[in-house]
Image (cartoon, rainbow, N blue to C red):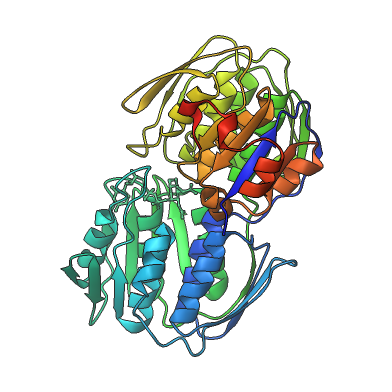
Amino acid sequence: MSTTHLVIEQSLNLNGRVMLNGAKNAVLVIMASLILTRGKSTLTNVPCSDDVIQMIALLRSLGAELFFLKDEHILQVDTTHLAHCKVNPEIMKKMRASILVMGPLLARFGRAEIAAPGGCVIGARPIDYHLKSFKKMGVVIDEQGDYLTAVVQRIKSGRLVFEYPSVGATENILMAATLTPGVTHLVNAALEPEVLDLIAILTKMGARISIHAPATIVVEGVSTLRAVEHDIIPDRLEAGALLLAAAVTGGTIELPQAHAYSMDVFLCKLEEMGHTIQIGEDGYGVTLKATPEPCAVSFKTAPYPGFPTDLQAPMMTAQCLAQGTSIIEEAVFENRLLHVRELQKMGAQIKADGVKATITGVEHLYGAGVIATDIRASCALALAGLAAKGTTVMTAIHHWMRGYDGLEKKLSTLGAHISFMNELELHALGLGRTEFSKEQSL
Ligand code: EPZ
């Protein structure tokens, strides 16, 4: 089957109103949390992205029954007959989020057999914070190479302190704690909006959870949790991508569902650039009207509510076209600047040094053959293609498919010329491999 590429033509002045999908980083962990229940749950506003399809396959392999109404974004999950606690290693390897079934499996069965989810280009992605806390809860973990067998006779409550507010570790331990007798404190916990959405559904299930300063989640264990209905929160990362599409093309985009208060630092930085941000009542609804002369801004990524690492790459694209110099420091992942090389192919003036990148704004970017290195890098490159003169052809678009559900369609409704093409279609348009100079090889 010929490779599919994402082809983006310069598309200035994108305008319009767009609805958001459910958050990828909420729905994946929420799907895993259903392992804690026995019964039929219904999730709404579920994005139809490749990672969701993978998580469906994983839950099915454990014995759950799932029915996905893709067009309606409704996912029905029946965990009544979920009986296995060994995760297929092939599925584990495909998606980092698969580690999030460990806590629910331990809570329900006292056992979990998984493969270490492995790293990816943005970092080693270790799971030591997860394992350290599970061991403190009395879990015995046998590591054989890439494979982990975790067993617990009587899971213990207690005070668990994270050395870093890891999103995944917080979610994994939190889910295990909901069915752990006694009171468990998660200190220095992650409190991203997606973690709060997990807490919301766990509470609906009957879990007893409260949040206390500073960044402490307190869980009083219960004996059972019930199946529920839940609407996934809108995706703030898709919202960020769409607002930046307006910013880099000089347009105006309205997102009625975006929750401004889940992206405060990001919106402040856009205003510092000179863009006009309008926020609706109670923070619901965000509109960006682009300034024709954006100023470069600097930022450092951090755990929530700091600048989100998942918007670092797309925001870097906006700095490439801003006036002045921007210094971006990626402080969450150790190798999340791989999109720099691809943006440089398009004419961006960027110097990367370790986890820091210094960007000098340029008048124009130019279409090129580029390679997506991770989900958010694929977004950064698509945004660059919308602003760049000429045509950009992106390969490795499985990253785009993993993280977004039809974002290219949404951009098209705003006036963007963006679509998938296979090699034959590319060639027919004279965009075959020969069209790009050798260093821009696809
Ligand atoms: C979640 O990953 C998200 N993924 C990531 O989104 C997001 O970038 C990240 O949180 C930070 O917000 C999902 O929710 C599915 P972490 P997670 O544990 O849980 C280190 C995207 O593009 N660490 O908060 O894996 C880790 O290496 C993805 O949507 C350890 O050292 O992130 C990283 O440097 C990318 N040991 C830092 O902590 C551990 O045991 C933050 O990781 C766990 C993490």
Q: Residue at x 64, y 60 (%)?
A: 47
Query: Residue 57, percent across and down?
Result: 50, 74
Relative vertical location of residue 322 with respect to residue 381 in this rendering, above or below: above
- Please state the total of marks drawn on the protein image: 0
Q: Nearer the viewer, residue 171 or 329?
A: 329
Question: Where in the figure is residue 390, as x and y percent of width and height?
Answer: 68, 25
Tell me which corner region of the image, top left, top right, bottom left or bottom right, holds residue 254: top right
Using the rendered image of the protein, determine whether residue 218 is visible from the camera's viewpoint.
yes
Front residue (pair 86, 32): 86
- Which residue appears at 55% of the width and 21% of the height? 319
Q: Residue furthest top?
A: 324
Whether residue 279 sits left or right of residue 204 in the image: it is: right
Residue 90's x, y, as percent? 38, 69
**Residue closest to the eye, 156 or 394:** 394
Q: Quadrant of the N terminus?
A: bottom right
* Image position of 78 with respect to 405: above or below: below
* Residue 8 versus residue 353 in the image, above or below: below
Write down the quadrant of residue 361 in the picture.
Answer: top right
Q: Residue at x 68, y 33 (%)?
A: 245
| Residue 183 location (% of width, % of height) | 34, 68
Picture residue at 41% right of the left edge, 82% below the top: 223
Residue 280 visible in rendering = no
Given residues 437 and 124, the one toward you in this image is: 437
Q: Residue furthest bottom?
A: 81
